[in-house]
C-alpha cells in the first residue's frame, strides 16, 4: 500500500549561484550550481516562531533550524551554454517572509541550503556565492512528498540521518574569485549573520578547496592556479611566488547587546574584524580576576600587540554581568565576526 503524497507547488524567491570545488568525480569540479530558494505554505515551520533575541542563541547551539525540502538535481545550461546543476530548496512561506525581513536570517538560510545540497550529493560547494538578478533558475519542481514526512520533526529526523552519514573531507578557506555572469552584482555586500541590532556590515566571502600544506599558507601571498591532471588525480595547487607576508594589526569593533531578563545569557558580545578569516584564528575564555573576556590571537598573519609572546585583548564587562566560567563562542567566517555568549 502506497502512502499518501502531496505535490508541492513552490513560489519563486531568489537564486544562489555557486560552483563545485571538490567532488569524487573530478569532471564535476568547477561546474556551476544554482540553488533556487523558494517557498510553499505546506512545508512545515519551526516549532518556535522567529524572534531575533530568542532564536539567534538557539541557532548558535544548533537548537533551531528552518525545515527545508530539496528537489531532485536537474541539469540545465548556464548563460554561456555550459552544463550546470539546478536544485530547489523549498521552505515554508512564513519562514521565507522572516528571511526577507531579517537579513541575518536570510544569510543563515543560504548557508543551510548550501550544506543541505552538499550532504545530499557528496560534493563541496564554494562559499563565495553570488545572488543573480532572477527569482528562479529554470522552472521550479513540483516535488511530491509523503504526508508523513510533512512535519518539522520528521524532516529534522531525516536531516539528522543525512548529517550522520556525511563523509565530506576536510577543507580550507582560499581566495579565488568566481567569474561573473547571469546578471548578478559582483562583490555584493552581504549582511551580518547575527547582528541583532540590524546594523549592516560589508563582508568578505571565502571559498573552499582541498587541504593546503601549512607551509604554503604561511609563505605564499597568492595561490592562483588549480591544475586538473588525469581523472585519477586529486587537485593540485601550484604556487607562483614566495613573498613573505608581513603581519598586520587587528582592526576591530566590539558591540554588547543585552538579552531579556528571562534569557539564559545576559549579554551577547560581538567582536567584528575584517581580518578574521578562519575559525582557528582566535580563542576565547573568561578571566575572573579582571572580570573580562580575553580574546587570544592564534594567527601568524595578524596581531593585537606586535612582538608580544602572549598576544591578546581583554574586553571588560560591567560589574552586574554574571559570566559562566565556560563561555560559549562561535566564529562566523562569512560575517568576519566572533560571537560570545
Image: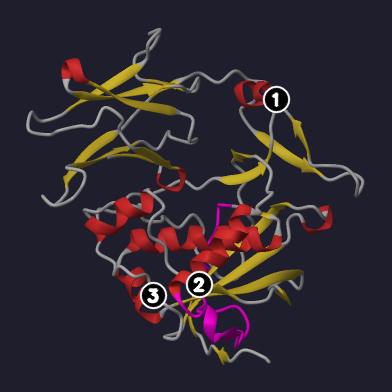
Q: Could you tell whether 37 is left or right of 31 in the image?
A: left
Pointer 1 or 2: first along the chain: 2
Magenta-drawn segment: 127-151
Name the disc covering residue 154, or none. Answer: 2
The tag earlier along the polypeptide, 3 or 2, is 3
Q: Which residue is mark 3?
A: 45
Model colouring: secondary structure
On the question of residue 125 being in view, the answer is no
- Nearer to the camera, 236 or 285: 285
Q: Look at the numbered disc 2 and give the secondary structure of its residue.
A: helix
In the rendered image, the quadrant that contains the C terminus is top left
Distance from label 3 to label 2 (Cα)? 12 Å
Residue 24 picture location, percent across and down: 79, 52
Which of the two discs, 3 and 2, sits closer to the camera?
A: 2
The mark lying in front, picked from 1 and 2, is 2
Q: Is residue 72 visible?
A: yes
Residue 73 image position (x, y, % from top left): 69, 73
Instruction: State the residue at coordinates (69%, 49%).
Output: 167
Q: Quadrant of the N terminus?
A: bottom right
Q: Is residue 128 magenta?
A: yes
Residue drawn 40% across and 38% down?
274
Q: Which residue is mark 1?
A: 241
Amino acid at each position: 500500500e502506497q502512502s499518501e503524497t502531496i505535490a508541492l507547488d513552490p513560489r519563486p524567491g531568489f537564486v544562489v549561484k555557486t560552483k563545485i570545488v571538490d567532488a569524487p568525480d573530478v569532471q564535476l569540479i568547477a561546474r556551476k550550481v544554482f540553488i533556487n530558494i523558494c517557498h510553499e505554505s505546506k512545508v512545515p515551520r519551526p516549532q518556535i516562531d522567529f524572534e531575533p533575541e530568542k532564536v539567534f542563541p538557539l541557532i548558535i547551539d544548533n537548537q533551531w533550524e528552518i525545515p527545508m525540502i530539496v528537489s531532485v538535481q536537474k541539469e540545465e545550461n548556464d548563460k554561456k551554454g555550459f552544463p550546470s546543476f539546478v536544485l530547489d530548496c523549498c521552505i515554508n512561506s512564513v519562514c521565507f517572509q522572516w528571511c526577507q525581513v531579517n537579513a541575518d536570517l536570510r544569510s543563515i538560510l543560504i548557508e543551510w541550503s548550501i550544506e543541505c545540497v552538499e550532504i545530499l550529493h557528496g560534493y563541496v560547494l564554494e562559499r563565495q556565492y553570488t545572488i543573480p538578478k532572477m527569482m528562479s533558475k529554470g522552472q521550479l519542481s513540483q516535488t511530491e512528498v509523503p504526508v508523513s514526512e510533512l512535519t518539522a520533526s520528521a524532516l529534522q529526523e531525516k536531516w539528522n540521518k543525512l548529517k550522520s552519514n556525511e563523509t565530506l573531507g576536510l577543507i580550507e578557506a582560499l581566495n579565488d574569485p568566481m567569474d561573473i555572469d547571469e546578471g548578478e552584482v559582483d562583490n555584493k555586500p552581504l549582511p551580518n549573520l547575527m547582528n541583532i541590532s540590524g546594523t549592516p556590515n560589508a563582508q568578505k566571502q571565502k571559498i573552499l578547496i582541498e587541504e593546503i600544506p601549512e607551509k604554503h599558507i604561511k609563505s605564499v601571498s597568492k595561490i592562483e592556479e588549480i591544475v586538473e591532471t588525469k581523472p585519477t588525480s586529486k587537485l593540485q595547487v601550484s604556487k607562483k611566488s614566495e613573498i613573505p607576508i608581513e603581519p598586520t594589526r587587528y582592526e576591530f569593533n566590539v558591540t554588547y547587546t543585552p538579552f531579556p531578563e528571562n534569557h539564559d545569557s545576559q549579554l551577547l558580545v560581538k567582536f567584528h574584524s575584517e581580518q578574521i578569516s578562519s575559525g582557528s584564528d582566535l580563542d576565547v575564555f573568561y578571566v575572573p580576576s579582571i572580570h573580562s573576556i580575553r580574546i587570544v590571537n592564534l594567527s601568524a598573519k595578524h596581531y593585537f600587540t606586535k612582538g608580544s609572546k602572549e598576544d591578546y585583548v581583554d574586553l571588560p564587562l560591567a560589574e552586574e554581568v554574571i559570566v559562566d566560567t565556560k563561555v560559549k563562542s562561535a566564529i562566523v567566517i562569512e560575517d568576519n565576526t566572533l560571537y560570545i555568549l
